[in-house]
Amino acid sequence: MQYRDFGKTGEKVSALGFGCMRFPVISDENSPDKGKINRPEAIKMLRDAIDSGVNYIDTAWGYHNGESEFVVGEALSDGYREKVFLATKMPVWEVNEKADFQKIFNRQLEKLKTDHVDMYMLHALGNGTFHDKVLKFDLMSEMRRLKAEGKVKYIGFSFHDNFDVFKNIVDSYEGCDFCQIQLNYIDVENQAGIKGLEYAASKGLAVIIMEPLLGGQLANPSVQVKNALDASRTPVQWALDFLWNRPEVSLLLSGMSNYQQTVDNLRYADESAVGKLSAAELEMMARAKKIFDGYRMVECTGCEYCMPCPAGLHIPEIFKIYNKYGQETQSGDPAKEYASLETKASACAECGQCEEACPQHIEIRNVMKQIAKTFE
């Protein structure tokens, strides 16, 4: 395992962090636990990753409908807690009065079976949540208080908005140690982007990368994109190396859903290095991005913040199928996949609940109308 500086904290973190938002789940249609985390498999994956050198584990209050923190707490028993930096997040949207902050944090400690959190974040900040929650209830002071009390070692935030909002938060968050942003070789100018990565690093912040594979879309890209990438590495390794190539990246998170993904990512992390990619290889990836952008119908990362849908739509799955439309894919026929959906885009009730939660600010109601027109 390769290790990197965590900003100016003096800590060394593994190049690969284990993201706990996409654990393997029970798929047996006859099981009453269908859709819940496959705990034995998830715990084995986590512990084997730690035994292989991963020392950063990332979870959050809402992951897997609140189940993720319980599973992480269980996995880190038997001495594993002492081997890692444990990260979780304050769900700012749940804070309706200042007292809620401490109540939620106390509950997280219980779920995680720990007396402290190493890296604690204000979750999914954007312009709205920053002003309506963080500033309104002075949550930055609450974060600094937890740090002063020894309940939290380092404080930061995760982010979903544009660069100007990102810069404002970085400049306003006194005592902030790190941030977490979405970045991959497609989204270099979206959200915080490369500019945000460089700006945060210039301020001494550690920078954690989420969605390095764009919700899995870069793991199994279209034939057109795959053919643009040199076959000497897998599409996954090219995507991860693009980020590890940057000195500003402290670590990247991968939400691993099966054991083979864990094995593969550990190998890629072992081979990672700053400056590994040549100018020609970076130009190759820029061409792959141009091809990808030419076919992308909707900028969904599969984060599932929009779920559950009151009308029963699986919004990210519908978008995933739609993004295959017009491409030569290696993973099925999008028209047939759409036809097999139990609830289709035309069932959208246009309530707008999903759009309020979407970090990508997708106009979901309008897109659903277009998808219904395309497939139905």
Image: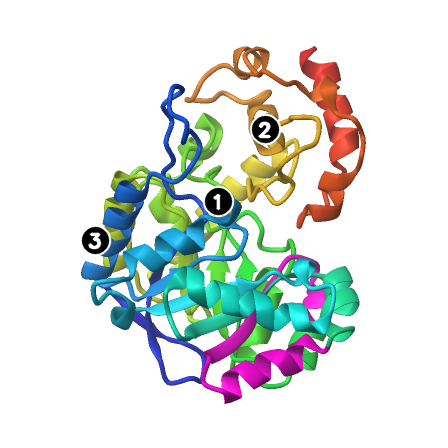
Residue type indicated by callout 2: Asn
Residue 112 part of the magenta segment: no
Distance in Å between CA atoms under marks 3 and 1: 21 Å
Q: Nearer the viewer, residue 177 or 150?
A: 150
Residue at x-position 47% and y-position 50%: 283
Q: Residue 281 in the image: x percent, y percent?
A: 40, 51
Q: Residues within 10 Å of mark 2 (few under 14, many from 20)?
A: some
Q: Residue 229 in the image: x percent, y percent?
A: 40, 39
User: Which quarter of the rendered picture does the N terminus lie within?
Assistant: bottom left
Residue stretch in magenta: 138-167
Q: Is residue 40 visible?
A: yes
Residue at x-position 65% and y-position 76%: 170
Image position of 240 with respect to 199: above or below: above
Q: Residue 176 in the image: x percent, y percent?
A: 57, 80
Instruction: From the image, tell me which residue sits under label 3.
Output: 48
Q: Residues within 10 Å of mark 1 (few under 14, many from 20)?
A: some
Contact, CB < 8 Å: mark 3 with mark 1? no
Residue 161 part of the magenta segment: yes
Residue type indicated by callout 3: Asp
Which numbered disc, 1 or 2, marks the residue that appears first in the sequence? 1
Contact, CB < 8 Å: mark 1 with mark 2? no
Instruction: From the image, tell me which residue sits under label 1.
Output: 64
Quarter-of-image position of residue 339: top right
Distance in Å between CA atoms under marks 2 and 3: 34 Å
| For residue 35, side relative to residue 260 (left or right) | right
Instruction: From the image, tell me which residue sits under label 2.
Output: 323
Q: Residue 361 in the image: x percent, y percent?
A: 73, 46
Q: Count up the numbered dots.
A: 3
| For residue 353, side relative to residue 110 (left or right) | right
Image position of 27 with respect to 73: above or below: above
Q: Nearer the viewer, residue 339 or 165?
A: 339
